[in-house]
Image (cartoon, coloured by chain):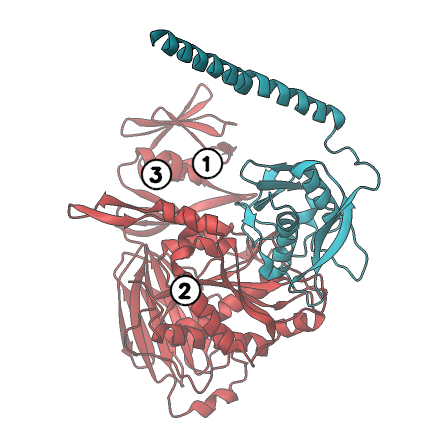
Chain colours: A red, B cyan
Amino acid sequence: MSTQTAPAPSLSLLTREGRRSLPLVVSGDQELVGLDDLATTFQLSVQESLGAITVSYKGRTIVLTPDQTLASVAGRLISLPSPPSRSGARWLVPVEFISRALAPIYDARIDLRKPSRLLVVGDLRVPRIAARYDTLGPSARLTIDATPRANSVVSQADDRITVQFDADALDAPAALLPQSPASGGLVQNVRLADATTIVVELGPRFAGFKATSQPIEDTMRLVLDLLAPTDTPTAAPQQPQPPSPPAPPELPPSFGQPASTMRMIAIDPGHGGEDEGATGLGGAKEKDLTLALARRARSVIEARLGVRVLLTRDDDRNVAIDDRTAVANNNKVDLFVSLHANASVRKTTSGAAIFYAAFDQSAIDAAGAGGSERLPAFGGGLREIELVPWELAQTRHLDRSSAFADLLAEHLHDRVPMSVRPTDRAPLRVLESANMPAILVELGYLSNAEQEKLLATDSFQATFVQALYETIIRFRDAGSGGTQ
Amino acid sequence: MTERRALTIGGVALLGIVIGWVLFVGVPRWYTARATRTVAASPAPIAPPPPGRKIKAHLYYVADDGLRLTSVERDIAYGEGTLAQAREIVAAQIAPVAEPLVSAVPTGTRLRALFVSERGEAFVDLSREIVAAHPGGTVDELLTIYTIVNTLTVNLPAITSVQVLVDGKEVDTLAGHIDLRRPLAKNLTWVQ
């Protein structure tokens, strides 16, 4: 309700000429805009006759009917979320009118960004900005994603790092970070300095930084690794707030190591949304546990290993099993790790177990039947292409999956309670289609009261993530990681 | 010579006709009659067998460690033919059991239908309780599936693989882990 006192809502209109605002009227969950305001802004003429409202632009017309959500745009029907409504002498239309009715007949490109209440007119480059800040022991990482891709120049002067984007404006939230950084004096604030510049205000403990950028699909990701002075590692325990994953002294951040064959990893937090997975007697839910661990693993692996980590879900929602594997396959990740928690009808069963895929002989025969075909290749000629059905993609990676499972079991051994069957194979749906080494970890049994408590502890989670991190390094260094 | 040759040819032809009649008309008639008699003798395949007639079968329950199945030999009702016997075995397998036995198949699960294909694949259609009342977890789901798969493939050699259906439909998984889109073969690594 406090939003009621916020300034009057408006749509920010961005053109070559500059930025101005269009007033919005909020009615229920609808955002409406005055037709008269649109007419002045976009040189439209509005006429009302015979119960219809005709909006014209350079001989093209939009016909609206009061109480009707359907409108005719240059002879084609479109639908609007709500009908035009009268407010005194004015007509109000939903903001979607701009993207669905006006954009198709307008000369310049119109891009409505409803979530950020931004309206971009003309060929302007206005990337959406999403920033994230992760604290990792003494150091920290600031990740800034720009979509569509925009390059940036990073410079440091005195107590600030300036990131200047090659764009016309930035589509960024008012608060760049969901919460202000509390990293014991590395960074004080991250803010928008002007239309295309982000400023990182540095704290007293800042000693240096390293910037890398990497295109990921339509996004350009800029990563700023912020380092504390290396000669004061004892400063870390003095931090008032507990850093989430404790940094192990024996494995310092591996910045600047030789290029590895491991570029990207997918971590799959099992279940989610309505599918809660297993539930403990104390109320712990598998879906929450797996998400917490996946996020924690992402922070540690991304910061210390310089490997990008994709999560198949980053919030509490249901993702279809095939979509989880598709995230890994489409991004050509080098490793797929699915996180789960177990349950048993026997309340004393306990321990972590790691699974890799198993296929019946009939399925493997079917995979072989796919065979290979000579298909036209880029640059002319024919190339032998091996065809493997989607649901059997994992058959080619079973050796490396089983090797990774054994390595992880070895690293977990003596550190967390293990099942008497620490590694096993099973026809697991989420692994069968994975076109890379892939495993599923069952962290422990939520049906066991003692294990339910253990799995929720900070020490268990930190230990597990540390073991996973070390396993990935071993796997990579053994030359098992990466794609050709 | 020509007369003798004609006689021989005639004899062979007659023999051919007789053999042909026996093979294509006589034997099928005889078989049909016998089959009809068999069907008439047991009009309903799932009708209760003659009282007291039992067979021994291995049924599967969760072992004490919760990580494997344990096999228990039981007397169960006799069923005429693979299909009827398969139904009896599944019905006995999913019936509620008393401690210390614990079933990996959730209580309340009913057998809706069971079919066996010519290739020996059994399709076991179970009621929705097998999903709704499932505790979740990879190992428990494995044990539930392999209870059904092994109870049929171990006791009935004619059945080579088993696919579990739920409420008449093919399902992806029971609880989000084990792929049920294909029939699964016997797997004794999950048995003690």
Residue at left 56%, top 55%? B177
- In this rendered view, identify the residue nearer to me: B74 or A467: B74
Q: Amino acid at mark 3?
A: Thr
How crowded is the residue under tag 3: few (<14 C-alpha within 10 Å), some, or many (20+)?
A: few
Q: CA distance from mark 3 to mark 2?
A: 67 Å
How crowded is the residue under tag 2: few (<14 C-alpha within 10 Å), some, or many (20+)?
A: some
Q: Using the rendered image of the protein, determine whether residue A195 is visible from the camera's viewpoint.
A: no
Disc 2 target residue: A399
Of callouts 1 and 3, the N-terminal one: 3
- In this rendered view, identify the residue nearer to me: A29 or A482: A482
**Which-is-in-front pick, marks 1 and 3?**
1
Find the residue positioned furthest to the front: B1
**Which-is-in-front pick, marks 2 and 1?**
2
Q: Is residue A166 above or below residue B2?
A: below
**Which-is-in-front pick, marks 3 and 2?**
2
User: Residue A461: horizontal and vertical position, in percent?
Assistant: 56, 74
Location of residue A299 by image quarter: bottom left
Tell me if label 3 and label 2 are in contact, CB under 8 Å. Answer: no
Residue at left 34%, top 8%? B2
Disc 3 target residue: A40
Disc 1 target residue: A93
Q: Is residue A256 above or below residue A341?
A: below
Q: Secondary structure at mark 1?
A: strand
Tell me if label 2 and label 1 are in contact, CB under 8 Å. Answer: no
Q: Amino acid at mark 2?
A: Asp
User: Residue A153: horizontal and vertical position, in percent?
Assistant: 25, 68
Q: Are marks 1 and 3 on the same chain?
A: yes
Of callouts 3 and 2, the N-terminal one: 3
Of callouts 2 and 1, the N-terminal one: 1
